């Protein structure tokens, strides 16, 4: 398993291997294991953005005839590619933060009770819900879950029993640090209130079966570029009666009839708010097309295979150097990244990037996070990265880097 | 005045004339008078976006070291260029709609009373405030103003007296249809509550003296591209105690220390929310640099001169064809666009675009809106456009176009 030939054999058998050539690959000596923070640029996106700049210059405001439906058209594509959603259930709009605010606000306005969020939920989700709870005069409950195995249905059920009446539960499908994948069906069955899923770390690497409400970002496994807008999903049967607290003109029925009171478009379109950013929308379209073409089955299978390969190498090579697995041990319980815990994780991460050219990131207090996007990560990349990591830590050279450096990702 | 030589003389004397060559100009036969909806692409923006795509591909997630401060750095630039704001008073974030929601929500949370908005305020502003008023259990008052001269201090004062206690007033600096410019100093003096200004139609063509709170868009006179994010401004002395209802991780102090409760950055930075779109931010930076370089004095002088020239030609040529001025008659009371009212404004607008290649837009019920961005509009363009418009309407050919077409701008 630890021979390079094994990695090469796995790559040769990988049905997704040809997708790698459809991305900008840059310096061949760099191993990029942070696509779960920011995906690589697809080649098609470069061409598409150049065409878009031409269109802006030549058609000017008239190009809006082509652009006006993009939030819905690209929303449908993203919904289909990552959620097997039907048309009319997904839009692209704003950031994940703003979309979560709109969707959770809509739910809270229609139901009494507390808001439940895991204590180790991605920070922006906790901040959004804490603010909404205050605005609506609700209790905000943060509940504990297993730090590595992540939120499970039993945690949600226990938290709900303690809270009494519950308005909404917010949960990441894949936990940002450990990569733990929640069992959506079990959580939906256990939750006494609507569950809003944050799919940021799972969209493009895992299925979220049986969910009704979701938001998620497009710049990770969907490769739409830094800070590209997010998606918002409401299953058809849940759309009636849900109204965004943040009412904007792109959510308005007949938006150019400007004299009227707010009268939202039916369904998920009512959650559109301000004028959408068009360059970002076409970048999302190109990124999501690759995900759709690859298909969730193959993406999921490769995500499991890549993370399993990393975990096996890590047991062989890194456990003796003080690393512990910070992710679930069962492949079917992981998203697309793996965390390795080590008391010196921060200087190791810095040295791994600066000296070894293996791009990863750090998540406190002690996790080195390695992302393995299945569209462009090779098994040989995993092998080479872990070899460099082993040599780095074995030599102690990670203690020589300047680890006072400010974290920005 | 109606001779073409006069227009050419004015262009020859125009100190801003050289800026025109710094934009993508496209088909020389098209006269673009809709830059108040969507500005033209600056040449520098094309180059900058190409470099950004290269940076994304080569530096990948590491480029965030360069990007992380863009919302504040570009915010400071925009604030300086359009508001003579000091550093730390302006950010770029989200859309105008979302920024208005955050800023008005922050004000309303700290003050009792009703929310006041002119009945003919830009729709998204009315929708935002109506929603906020409902969420916070406040009265939402729409007040009448003169349809052409726009909101004046006396209208605000009267509306406030009728409302009793007032939490906030929201007002466009330049009215989207008539182009009427509000007297910011007089309104600030008359208002019994904080005034939140929407500078979307004035940023880059008019000064907003003495204001304390504003939002505004960057894709009009700042030429940042379709749906580019918006700015949010809070004068330094008003920042203490203002907290956004929409709490996101970019507003968090030490955002990568992920375990803590929400603890917003001081001042206007606390209004940052989700991950910002980086391509849009660099496009705003390039656009705003041109505005800063041109300078507000020269931009304002040229906006007045261009609109005055259009009004004079219109009196000579178009009044006999049934057109009436739908904008203030005094140049110092206008922003950067002029509205001409005509009972057949909608088919005239369609034919003007499709047959005469003069790009303008329609605003109900009867306004043809002509935008004259001072950075790239020539006096000769105004002359030629009005000549084509006169010939079109005199010939009656505007009755031959398909005016059933759906409006999308």
Image (cartoon, coloured by chain):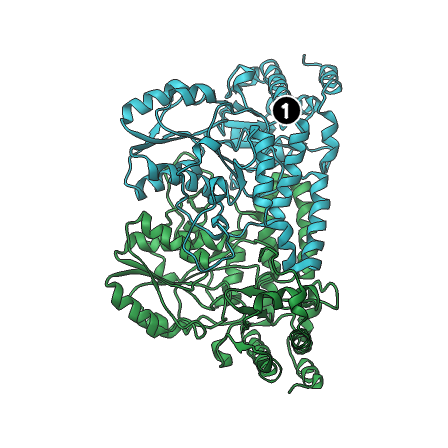
Chain colours: A cyan, B green
Say above or below: A364 vs A225: above
Residue A356 seen in this snapshot: no
Which residue position is annotated with label 1? Answer: A299
Residue B140: give x, y in percent of width and height. 32, 57
**Horizontally, is A94 left or right of A397 in the view?**
left
Identify which residue is drawn at 31% across, 72% down.
Answer: B190
Quarter of the rendering occupied by the N terminus of chain A: top right
Q: Nearer the viewer, residue A206 or B328?
A: B328
Residue A350: which quarter of the image?
top right
Identify which residue is drawn at 58% across, 38% down.
Answer: A219
Number of marks in picture: 1
Residue A8: which quarter of the image?
top right
Identify which residue is drawn at 73% across, 45% down.
Answer: A47
Residue B52 seen in this snapshot: yes
Say above or below: B405 vs A312: below
Residue B231: give x, y in percent of width and height. 49, 57
Q: Nearer the viewer, residue B405 or B22?
A: B405
Which structural element holds mark 1?
A: helix
Q: Nearer the viewer, residue B31 or B61?
A: B31
Residue A391: give x, y in percent of width and height. 64, 23
Residue B114: give x, y in percent of width and height. 28, 58
Q: Nearer the viewer, residue A151 or B317?
A: B317
Callout 1: 10 Å neighbours few (<14), some, many (20+)? Answer: many
**Horizontally, is A386 left or right of B143 in the view?**
right
């Amino acid at each position: 398993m630890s021979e390079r030939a094994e990695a090469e054999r796995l790559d040769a058998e990988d049905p997704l291997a040809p997708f790698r050539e459809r991305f900008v690959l840059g310096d061949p000596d760099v191993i990029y294991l942070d696509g779960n923070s920011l995906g690589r640029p697809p080649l098609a996106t470069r061409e598409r953005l150049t065409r878009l700049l031409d269109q802006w210059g030549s058609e000017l405001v008239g190009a809006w005839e082509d652009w006006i439906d993009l939030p819905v058209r690209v929303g449908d594509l993203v919904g289909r590619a990552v959620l097997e959603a039907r048309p009319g259930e997904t839009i692209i709009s704003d950031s994940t933060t703003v979309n979560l605010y709109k969707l959770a606000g809509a739910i809270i306005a229609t139901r009494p009770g507390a808001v439940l969020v895991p204590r180790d939920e991605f920070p922006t989700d906790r901040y959004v819900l804490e603010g909404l709870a205050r605005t609506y005069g609700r209790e905000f409950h943060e509940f504990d879950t297993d730090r590595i195995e992540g939120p499970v249905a039993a945690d949600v059920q226990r938290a709900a029993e303690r809270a009494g009446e519950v308005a909404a539960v917010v949960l990441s499908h894949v936990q940002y640090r450990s990569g733990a994948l929640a069992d959506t069906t079990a959580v939906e069955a256990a939750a006494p209130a609507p569950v809003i899923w944050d799919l940021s770390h799972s969209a493009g690497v895992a299925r979220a079966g049986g969910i009704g409400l979701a938001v998620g970002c497009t710049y990770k496994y969907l490769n739409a570029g830094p800070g590209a807008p997010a998606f918002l999903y409401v299953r058809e049967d849940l759309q009636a009666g849900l109204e965004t607290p943040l009412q904007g003109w792109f959510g308005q029925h007949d938006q150019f009839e400007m004299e009227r009171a707010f009268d939202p478009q039916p369904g998920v379109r009512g959650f559109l708010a301000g004028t959408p950013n068009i360059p970002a929308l076409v970048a999302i379209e190109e990124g999501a097309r690759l995900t759709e073409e690859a298909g969730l089955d193959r993406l999921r299978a490769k995500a499991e295979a890549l993370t399993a390969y990393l975990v096996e190498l890590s047991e062989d090579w890194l456990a003796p150097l003080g690393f512990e697995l910070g992710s679930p041990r069962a492949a079917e319980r992981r998203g697309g990244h793996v965390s390795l815990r080590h008391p010196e994780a921060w200087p190791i991460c810095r040295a791994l990037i600066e000296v070894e050219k293996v791009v990863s990131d750090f998540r406190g207090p002690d996790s080195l996070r390695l992302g393995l996007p299945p569209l462009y990560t090779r098994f040989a990349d995993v092998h080479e990265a872990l070899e460099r990591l082993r040599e780095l830590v074995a030599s102690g050279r990670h203690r020589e880097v300047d680890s006072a450096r400010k974290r920005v990702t």
